[in-house]
Image (cartoon, helix red, strand yellow):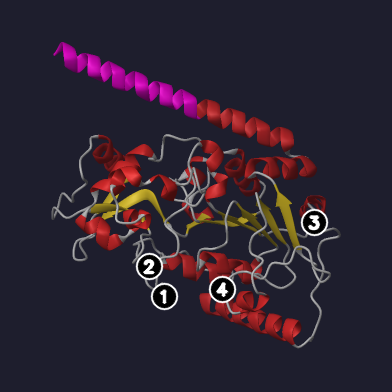
Amino acid sequence: MSEAPPEPPNTKEGEETTSEPEEPSDDSSEEEAAGDSEMDFLRNLFSRNLGIGSPEKVLDDLTLEGVAKYILSGKCKNIICMAGAGISTSAGIPDFRSPDTGLYANMQKYNLPYPEAIFQIDYFKKHPEPFFALAKELYPGQFKPTTCHYFMKLLKDKGLLKRCYSQNIDTLERVAGLESGDLIEAHGTFFTSHCVKFTCRKEYNLDWMKEKIFSDDIPRCEKCNSLVKPDIVFFGESLPVRFFTSMKMDFPRCDLLIIMGTSLQVQPFASLISRVSKSCPRLLINMEKTGQGDPMLGLLGFGGGMDFDSAKAYRDVAHISTCDDGCMELANLLGWKAELEELVKREHSRIDSQDKEAKSSESKGASASAVV
């Protein structure tokens, strides 16, 4: 499974749904980072609407080549990636909204009242079977990370990745080598699960949940017998508190924002593009241009506001291609193409080898049981 259920309603900053501790501030307190973000908001508001001040143009050219030149200049040291379902489709994971191939277009077999019900928390508590049937089809561990995932790992290895903010719940960023500190899984993750009972909340790991799902058992808490749900954000649930605390620290420090494979239609994730400074370049790698809503909505924190084509465009670059092709082309311009290709080849070979060993062990175990 990839991009998480879109737009949980009535999300409020500070509502915590995970037990993951907040990571410490890098060089200043969370309050200072939040203050920087608010000040930047005001500067944008005045400069764009009252004509006060002029934004600094960082890129020589509004092209992929211009972005590569900027990265190689040494001035770009804190890159944030925003990732959506489009970075995982080449791994074989469908997105949500494609008319014919998306998940919502193929829900008839689950006899749902409406497609989105499969990710509605109230419906899940009464009818968990459809969700776990879908989870078995698309469970993490059955897919390999894509070139795009490994490009982000390469950014990390070169000390350039500040953070990856992902809408996806497929855990492929982790499989590719990003760790908890590198990731903000905005819509949650399958990596951990919890009992849904508020007074219990017992935690379970990925292997425990996988065993339950593939044995066609509805996962129930060993302590209180309530349902156990993967820590993905359903409709009716709040985003993880770490999403809100981290964005206040990260985005004011961002030197380059790379947005990949997302429609920028889901809030509050889409609003992140407006949280970088007004001089910060923003690169979109996607099959179509997105995020070009009313600039005022961007200023008010509701996403949009990207400008690729007007006479006033000065920092936004749209590279229209698949995420894998765009990342490989950028890697080529950076002189990293051979390194990225080798990383993908080596890691895919390692994953295939591990899968082969696991299947061999399962087969031997089954044979031993049969003999006994």
Q: Earlier in the sequence, mark 1 or mark 2?
A: 1
Image coordinates of residue 255 in percent, x first then y, are 70, 63
The disc label shown at residue 70, or none:
3
Q: What span is in magenta?
A: 351-372
Residue at 47 percent across and 51 percent down: it is 96
Kind of residue indicated by mark 2 = Ser
Q: Earlier in the sequence, mark 4 or mark 1?
A: 1
Kind of residue indicated by mark 4 = Phe
Q: Residues within 10 Å of mark 2 (few under 14, many from 20)?
A: many
Residue at 57 percent across and 61 percent down: it is 264
Image coordinates of residue 142 in percent, x first then y, are 42, 34
Q: Is residue 308 above or below residue 359?
A: below
The kind of secondary structure element at disc 2 is: loop
Query: Mark 3 to mark 4: distance in Å?
Result: 28 Å
Q: Which residue is mark 4?
A: 302
Is residue 351 left or right of 233 when viewed as pictured?
A: right
Query: Mark 2 to mark 4: distance in Å?
Result: 17 Å
Query: Mark 4 to mark 1: distance in Å?
Result: 14 Å
Quadrant of the image occupied by residue 258: bottom right
